[in-house]
């Protein structure tokens, strides 16, 4: 699903965020990305979502070389991805339903289909009763779940989450992570950046550790060549 | 044709999306009535100004058509000339081979007209005697394309000892036409400048709108909205500004015209004319709204293409 081939990212000003990263996350896998802040977790996710472009190397997403994607085509790559942010990025000028419906409206779904899918997504995160609520009236955990519903409503192939539990207490954090595990069970590839090692251990998914922009530990069961390690 | 139902349903979804976006843009304007009214009023005034000038000129041009064909010579007689002397001169002149008709405006009638037209009627009351001379209006038989003959006639008439001044009225008609020509040009200049002003007003309003919706634009880009999708509501906003501004400009023009209609009709009656102020007409009204619409779209397009690029998710 995601294949990093010798990726380096240097930001303007000379800061090396990532150096020579090679990774391979297969379809349907779930993995955690860990490391201290500044280790390059966010940069790695941004490269996949094409928010940033690599300085060197190639990234393949579902077999497509992202270097060959022009800026105009970026939206169509992003439509295959669901992105979840630490600060949820919800729009407070519209109710929960409209927030979740955004990806479907962008992709031109019809009204009945939008209704069906939004309610299904809200049901999955346990917020069906809040569809008419204003996001600002929800708790932090609920807002994060609305963000997750928006990320999964269009059934993306890949789910990216950047510190999704950063502001939540341990109990809520575990609920959120279990939610991701459930999406993974139905076939979605999931990559979560998190520094909550305790929680990661509980979930038991493989872990990739970054340190100073390099991979310090790769717990993925497959090597660069796509062959089993074990 | 196997996939045609799917395509048609997609097309329907596309159109209903456009309809929804355009109505949402309109609703957004409606939800901020004061700001919307101010912006559209600026647009409307900027458009109504050249439109008003255009209507004024069109009317002047309409009134003055045919004036150059009916050249007149006004003979202002000496004040001591009596009415019977004037009448004698009138009948004498009417026998002249180059003269078609001579009109006599006696002192009373002259005073009457002067009172009605000039508005100095009250001032005239303080005079003991009527200061106006008898005027003979000579309609020559000659055509206006024979200026030499006309000039000679004017000179001959001016030499008559009863006549104080012989004035060829074609002179001021010519001046009027030159003036209309200049005014026409200046309308173009003024219109272009005001059109640029409208572009800037709409562009700036849309720029502020984009800044206010920065968060929404960022999120939309992150979840895969194309540039066209993000542009659309702003273009519709500009479109609505244009339409509303155009219609308001039309209303302003109508109101101004209706305010001027009565006095102008009165004036026309004084000239024994049935002249009525011509308004904008359906064609020109549609053209006005079309232009306004185009300005709205162009203004928002400029703003959108300049400022949407700056907003990228990070």
Image (tube, rainbow, N blue to C red):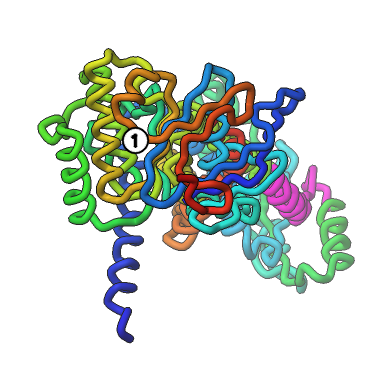
| Residue B258 appears anywhere in the view | no
Residue B88 against residue B95 in the figure, above or below: above
Residue at mark 1: B28
Identify the residue at the far bottom of this view. B1
How far across and how far down the image is residue A122, in percent?
19, 38
Q: Is residue B97 shown above or below B49? A: below
Is B164 part of what is drawn in magenta? yes
Q: Horizontally, is B63 left or right of B218 in the view? A: right
- Residue visible at 39% across and 19% down in the picture: A196
- Quadrant hosting residue B168: bottom right
Element under disc 1: helix
Residue furthest to the front in view is A230
Q: Nearer the viewer, residue B16 or B146?
A: B16
Residue B171: x %, y % from top left: 78, 52
Relative to B174, B260 lies left or right: left
Q: Is residue B77 above or below residue A113?
A: above
Report whether A114 appears left or right of B204: left
Q: Chain of mark 1?
A: B
B74 to the left or right of A125: right
Numbered disc total: 1
Q: Which residues are magenta?
A: B160-189
Q: What residue is at 53 percent from the left and 58 percent from the top?
A: A63
Mark 1 crowdedness (10 Å alpha carbons): few <14, some 14-19, many ≥20: some
């Amino acid at each position: 699903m995601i294949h990093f081939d010798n990726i380096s990212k240097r930001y303007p000003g000379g800061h090396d965020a990532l150096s020579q990263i090679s990774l391979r996350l297969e379809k349907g896998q779930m993995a955690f990305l860990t490391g201290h802040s500044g280790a390059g977790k966010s940069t790695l996710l941004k490269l996949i979502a094409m928010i940033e472009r690599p300085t060197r190397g190639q990234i393949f997403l579902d077999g497509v070389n992202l270097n060959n994607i022009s800026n105009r085509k970026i939206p169509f790559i992003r439509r295959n991805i669901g992105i979840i942010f630490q600060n949820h990025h919800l729009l407070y000028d519209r109710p929960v339903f409209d927030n979740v419906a955004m990806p479907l409206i962008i992709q031109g779904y019809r009204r009945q289909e939008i209704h069906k899918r939004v309610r299904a997504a809200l049901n999955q995160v346990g917020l069906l009763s809040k569809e008419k609520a204003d996001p600002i009236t929800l708790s932090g955990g609920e807002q994060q779940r609305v963000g997750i519903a928006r990320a999964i409503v269009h059934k993306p192939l890949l789910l990216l989450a950047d510190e999704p539990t950063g502001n939540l207490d341990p109990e809520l954090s575990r609920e959120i992570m279990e939610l991701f595990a459930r999406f993974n069970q139905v076939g979605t590839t999931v990559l979560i950046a998190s520094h909550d090692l305790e929680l990661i251990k509980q979930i038991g998914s493989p872990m990739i550790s970054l340190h100073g922009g390099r991979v310090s530990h790769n717990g993925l069961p497959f090597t660069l060549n796509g062959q089993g390690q074990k | 044709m196997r996939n045609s139902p799917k395509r048609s349903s997609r097309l329907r979804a596309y159109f209903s999306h456009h309809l929804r976006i355009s109505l949402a843009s309109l609703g957004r304007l409606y939800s901020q009535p004061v700001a919307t009214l101010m912006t559209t009023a600026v647009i409307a005034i900027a458009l109504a100004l050249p439109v008003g000038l255009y209507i004024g000129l069109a009317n002047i041009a309409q009134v003055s058509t045919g004036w150059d064909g009916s050249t007149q010579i006004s003979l202002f007689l000496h004040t001591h000339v009596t009415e019977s002397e004037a009448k004698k001169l009138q009948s004498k002149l009417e026998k002249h081979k180059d003269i078609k008709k001579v009109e006599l405006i006696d002192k009373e009638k002259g005073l009457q007209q002067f009172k009605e037209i000039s508005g100095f009627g009250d001032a005239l009351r303080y005079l003991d005697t009527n200061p106006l001379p008898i005027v003979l209006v000579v309609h020559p038989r000659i055509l206006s394309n024979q200026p030499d003959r006309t000039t000679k006639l004017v000179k001959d008439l001016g030499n008559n000892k009863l006549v104080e001044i012989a004035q060829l009225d074609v002179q001021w008609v010519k001046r009027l036409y030159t003036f209309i020509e200049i005014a026409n040009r200046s309308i173009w200049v003024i219109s272009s400048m005001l059109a640029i002003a409208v572009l800037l007003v709409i562009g700036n309003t849309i720029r502020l709108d984009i800044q206010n919706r920065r968060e929404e634009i960022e999120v939309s880009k992150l979840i895969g909205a194309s540039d066209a999708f993000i542009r659309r509501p702003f273009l519709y906003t500009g479109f609505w500004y244009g339409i509303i501004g155009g219609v308001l400009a039309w209303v302003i023009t109508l109101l101004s015209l209706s305010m001027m209609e009565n006095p102008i009709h009165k004036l026309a009656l004084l000239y024994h004319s049935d002249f009525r102020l011509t308004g904008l007409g359906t064609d020109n009204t549609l053209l006005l709204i079309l232009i306004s619409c185009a300005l709205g779209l162009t203004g928002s397009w400029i703003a959108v293409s300049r400022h949407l690029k700056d907003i990228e998710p990070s």
